[in-house]
Image (cartoon, rainbow, N blue to C red):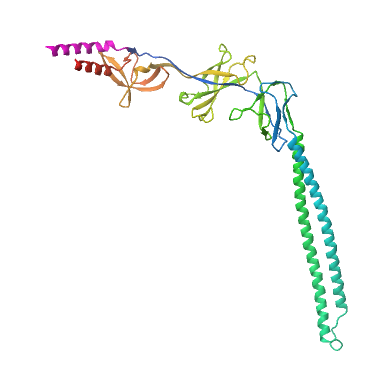
C-alpha cells in the first residue's frame, strides 16, 4: 500500500513537471549584435613633419616643441645640435688638406724620379752610341779580348737604356695609381664636407602653416625628446586638419566575429559622454595583434569614418569609446541562451509537445551575450524549455528513491 502511494505521488509530480518548467515561445524577431571598442581620434588629413631630407647623417635633437603646441607658420618645431656637423666639417677640411699635401708630395717625387730615370736613359743611349761608334771588330788590329770587351760594352749600354725606360714606365704608373688613391681620399673628404654643410643648413624644422602639433609615438608609445637621434625623413609629428576626424579603435579578437567594412558605429568622447557621433567602419585589420607590447591579448584595429566632426571638442589623441553594430537581422529565431543545451556533442532545445518536452537538434548561427540565433530545427510558435527537463526528472527520481 505504501509503495502504491509513493508511485502515485511520483506520477503526480511528473504530471506537474511540464507546468513547473519555465518556457519561451519562439517567434521571429529583430536580432542585433553589438561590440564595444576603445581607441583614439585621428585626423583624416594632416601635414606630416619629418627630419630634413637633405641631412644624410643622423641628427641629435637639441630642442623640440611640446605635444599639442599651437603653431603659427614659421614657428620652430625641432632644433638639432650642430656639434656633430661642425666636427664633421672640420674633419672633412683637414682630410682635404691632407690629401692636397699628399698630392703635392707625390707629384714632386714623381717628377724627380722621372727626371733621374730620363737622365739615366739618355746617358745609356750616349754610351750605346759611343760603343757602336768605336768598334773593335778588326781581328788583325785588335786582340780577341778587346773585341769581346767592345761587344760587352754595347750590350751593357743597351740593357741600361732598356732598364731605365722600363723603370720609368713603372714609376709613372705607380705615380698615377698614387694620384688616383689621393683623389679618392679627396672625394671622401668632399663627401664629409657636403654632409656637414647640408646638416648645418637643416638644423631646424619649422611649421609650414598654422595648426596644432601632434608628435608621433613609436611602438613603445614614446615621443621624440631631447637627445634622441633622427635620420633624414624620420617622422616627427603632424599638423592635423581639425575639420575632418576619424576614430581608430581596437576590438578584442574574441568579439571580432562578423566585423566588416560598412557597419554602423557610434562613437562617444571619453571627455564628454553626452557627445555622440555616428559613422561607418572603413577598414579592419587583416590580422589581430597585441595592443600593448609583451601582452598576449590580441586586438583587431578598426577605423571608423565619422559623419561629422566638432573641432571645438574633438582633438587628435582624444580617447573614445565606440559601439559597433556587427549584425542586424530583421527576422530571426533568437532564443535565450539558457534555452540551448549540449548533449553528446550536439546542440539541442527541448520543445513542448502534448504536455511533454522532447529534445530537438538545432543548428545555431551567431550569438550575443544573452541570445542565440537558431537557423534550423525550430519553427514559429514552438514553446521551448528554459531549463533542462531531463535534469529535473533525474532529480525527482533521486528524491523518490530516497523516500
Give the x, y percent position of residue 288.
Answer: 50, 29
Q: How many marks can you see?
A: 0
Where residue 51 sits, quadrant-wise, is top right
Can I make out residue 260 in this image? no
Q: Main secondary structure of the magenta part?
A: helix
Can I make out residue 85 in this image? yes
Q: Residue furthest bottom?
A: 140
Please say whether residue 43 is one of the residues in the magenta stretch: no
Looking at the picture, tell me which residue is in the foreground, 379 or 388. Answer: 388
Give the x, y percent position of residue 229.
Answer: 67, 34
Looking at the picture, tell me which residue is in the foreground, 263 or 131. Answer: 131
Looking at the picture, tell me which residue is in the foreground, 51 or 240. Answer: 51
Q: Residue furthest left?
A: 1
Residue at 24% across / 10% down in the picture?
16
Residue at 87% across / 76% down in the picture?
130
**Quadrant housing the C terminus:** top left
Asked if residue 376 lies left or right of residue 209, the reply is: left
Magenta residues?
Answer: 1-22
Please say whether residue 12 is one of the residues in the magenta stretch: yes
Give the x, y percent position of residue 89.
Answer: 77, 40
Give the x, y percent position of residue 287.
Answer: 51, 30
Is 246 rendered above or below residue 160? above
Residue at 34% across / 22% down in the picture?
362
Amino acid at each position: 500500500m505504501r509503495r502504491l502511494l509513493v508511485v502515485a505521488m511520483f506520477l503526480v509530480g511528473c504530471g506537474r513537471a511540464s507546468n513547473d518548467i519555465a518556457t519561451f515561445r519562439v517567434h521571429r524577431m529583430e536580432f542585433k549584435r553589438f561590440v564595444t571598442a576603445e581607441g583614439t581620434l585621428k585626423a583624416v588629413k594632416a601635414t606630416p613633419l619629418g627630419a630634413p631630407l637633405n641631412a644624410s647623417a643622423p641628427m641629435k635633437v637639441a630642442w623640440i616643441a611640446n605635444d599639442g603646441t599651437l603653431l603659427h607658420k614659421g614657428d620652430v618645431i625641432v632644433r638639432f645640435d650642430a656639434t656633430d656637423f661642425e666636427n664633421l666639417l672640420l674633419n672633412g677640411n683637414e682630410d682635404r688638406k691632407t690629401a692636397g699635401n699628399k698630392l703635392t708630395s707625390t707629384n714632386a717625387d714623381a717628377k724627380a724620379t722621372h727626371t733621374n730615370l730620363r737622365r739615366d736613359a739618355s746617358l745609356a743611349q750616349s754610351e750605346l752610341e759611343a760603343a757602336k761608334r768605336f768598334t773593335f771588330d778588326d781581328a788583325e788590329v785588335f786582340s780577341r779580348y778587346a773585341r769581346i770587351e767592345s761587344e760587352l760594352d754595347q750590350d751593357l749600354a743597351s740593357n741600361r737604356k732598356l732598364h731605365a725606360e722600363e723603370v720609368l714606365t713603372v714609376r709613372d704608373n705607380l705615380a698615377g695609381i698614387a694620384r688616383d688613391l689621393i683623389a679618392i681620399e679627396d672625394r671622401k673628404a668632399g663627401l664629409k664636407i657636403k654632409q656637414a654643410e647640408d646638416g648645418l643648413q637643416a638644423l631646424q624644422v619649422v611649421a609650414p602653416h598654422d595648426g596644432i602639433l601632434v608628435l608621433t609615438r613609436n611602438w613603445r608609445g614614446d615621443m621624440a625628446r631631447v637627445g634622441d637621434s633622427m635620420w633624414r625623413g624620420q617622422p616627427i609629428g603632424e599638423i592635423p586638419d581639425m575639420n575632418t576626424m576619424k576614430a581608430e579603435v581596437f576590438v578584442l579578437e574574441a568579439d571580432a566575429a562578423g566585423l566588416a567594412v560598412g557597419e554602423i558605429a557610434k562613437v562617444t568622447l571619453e571627455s564628454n559622454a553626452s557627445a555622440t557621433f555616428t559613422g561607418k567602419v572603413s577598414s579592419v585589420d587583416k590580422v589581430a595583434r597585441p595592443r600593448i607590447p609583451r601582452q598576449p591579448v590580441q586586438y583587431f584595429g578598426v577605423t571608423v569614418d565619422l559623419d561629422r566632426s566638432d573641432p571645438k571638442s574633438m582633438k587628435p589623441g582624444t580617447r573614445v569609446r565606440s559601439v559597433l553594430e556587427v549584425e542586424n537581422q530583421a527576422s530571426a529565431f533568437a532564443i535565450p541562451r539558457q534555452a540551448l543545451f549540449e548533449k553528446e556533442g550536439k546542440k539541442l532545445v527541448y520543445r513542448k509537445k502534448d504536455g511533454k518536452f522532447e529534445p530537438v537538434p538545432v543548428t545555431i548561427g551567431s550569438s550575443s551575450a544573452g541570445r542565440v540565433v537558431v537557423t534550423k530545427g525550430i519553427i514559429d510558435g514552438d514553446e521551448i524549455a528554459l531549463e533542462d527537463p531531463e535534469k529535473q526528472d533525474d532529480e525527482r527520481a533521486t528524491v523518490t528513491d530516497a523516500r
